[in-house]
Amino acid sequence: MAEEAVKPTPLRLLVSEEFKSRLKAQAGRMGVTMGEIIEAVATKPLRELELKSVQASGNEQPETFKDLIRQKYFELMNSGKLGHQRLKELSFGQKPTIKERQLISQILELDSLPED
């Protein structure tokens, strides 16, 4: 099942005796290890969970202004309205001007920005 030659790493699972028996029997019928079956079956759902987790963390509202700048740095940079150096300064805690706050709010389409 595994296409790449990867060194197996031990993993201990607590499962029911019935599940273990069924898994062992299926592995025997297929001529593979129980670990290979579990990896084949779990790979796609694990990727989906990872994607959901990354998306959820991207949607979290930052607590401080500098966290917002760090989280949305590339989006702000790609807008072309704020320079790299100024974004870097803001990401390290420098206070934005009122005009910069308005611009960032507009670029990110946010009604309000976090305070420091």
Image (cartoon, helix red, strand yellow):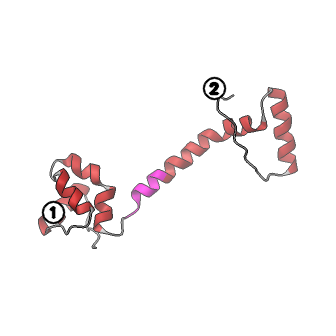
Distance Cα–Cα, label 1 vs label 2: 52 Å
Residue lying farthest to the front in this orientation: 7
Q: Mark 1 points at which residue?
A: 100
Residue type beneath disc 1: Glu
Name the residue nearer the viewer: 47 or 83: 83
Region in magenta: 54-61
Q: Earlier in the sequence, mark 1 or mark 2?
A: 2
Under circle 2, the secondary element is loop
Q: Does the magenta stretch include residue 59?
A: yes
Q: Where is residue 87 in the image (x, y as percent from the top left)?
A: 21, 56
Query: In this picture, is 22 found above or below 28?
Result: below
The residue depicted at 30 percent of the width and 55 percent of the height is 72
Q: Where is residue 26 in the image (x, y as percent from the top left)?
A: 82, 33
Residue lying farthest to the left in this orientation: 99
Q: Mark 2 points at which residue?
A: 3
Residue type beneath disc 2: Glu
The residue carrying pointer 1 sits among few (fewer than 14), some (14 to 19) or many (20 or more) residues within 10 Å by Cα, namely some
The residue depicted at 27 percent of the width and 50 percent of the height is 75
Query: In this picture, is 60 found above or below 53?
Result: below
Q: Does the magenta stretch include residue 10?
A: no
